[in-house]
Image (cartoon, rainbow, N blue to C red):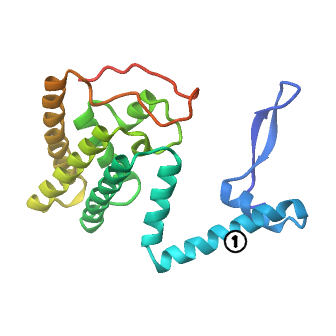
Amino acid sequence: MTNCHQLKFKAEDGKMRLTDVADPETILRIVQSVPSPKAEPIKLWLAKVGYERMKEIADPELSINRARDNWQKHGRSEKWIQQRMMGQETRNKLTDYWKDHEIKEGEEYAILTNLIHQEWTGISVKQHKNLKGLKTQNLRDHMSEAELIFTALAELSTRQIAESDNATGMEENKTASVKGGRIAKKARLDLEEKTGRSVITDQNFLPKGSKRKNKISKK
């Protein structure tokens, strides 16, 4: 009960009443403790997932293959998957640099990430998600090939500038982030001028019927 709380939700009678709630981890622990045969399928699934994760710890390549399989099941092309994975590698190298140069994982990572993103796109990460009609989904999993490429360019440029300047701490890495984002912004504007098409789009990979379009002006 330590991890269970009460929040007010609208009940069948239309009134707001306190309702027991818990996070996903706590709910799964509750399911594990239920002695009913109806809970057995979920228990078996949890055991299967746990075993798969243990194998992935021993052989990290398995987790890469699992990600590829999941993206394929969601209809992503091989070209998109390759770009997504290359972009993730670029992202990992940047966060490794931040970790070694006095940037705290979590809030400070998010601040710098948003700074890079806003610099090259002209909109924040939150605005970009709203444009695509996303809520809890990962923005990068709903980017077009072009958006992935420019995101990778911005983060690659940021890391190389930071390395050249030996940027340490938030203020110096903020400066590197702005400079890295501007390099990708210049490339984006050049491409948009040549093609007449915006790199930033409202396209996503959500199931049909769940897309919500929002218009956001970009500079």
Look at 13% across and 34% down and name the residue there.
186
**Circle 1 crowding by C-alpha within 10 Å: few under 14, some 14–19, many from 20:** few
The quadrant the N terminus occupies is: bottom right
**Which residue in the rendered view is the most extreme toward the left?**
164
Q: Quadrant of the C terminus?
A: top left
Helix or strand or loop: what does disc 1 sit on? helix
Q: Is residue 80 above or below residue 50?
A: above
Q: Would residue 71 be seen by someone viewing this image from the given angle?
A: yes
Q: In the image, residue 131 lies at what x, y percent?
A: 42, 27
Residue 55 % position (x, y): 54, 77
The front one of 190 and 26 is: 190
The residue lying at 28 percent from left, 23 percent from top is 218
Query: Along the line of sight, which residue is nearer the eye, 38 or 215?
Result: 38
Q: Is residue 48 left or right of residue 141?
A: right
Q: Is residue 65 above or below residue 4?
A: below
Foreground residue among 208 and 137: 208
| Identity of the residue drawn at 14% across and 57% down | 160
Above or below residue 65? Residue 188 is above
Q: How many marks?
A: 1
List x then y, in percent, for residue 68: 45, 57
Residue 30: tell me if it is visible: no
Q: Which residue is the extreme one toward the bottom?
A: 58
Q: Is residue 104 left or right of residue 43?
A: left
Residue shown at the point (40%, 19%) measured from the top left:
215
* Apparent side of residue 131 relative to residue 37 in the rendered image (left or right): left
Snapshot quadrant of residue 102 = bottom left
Q: Which residue is mark 1?
A: 47
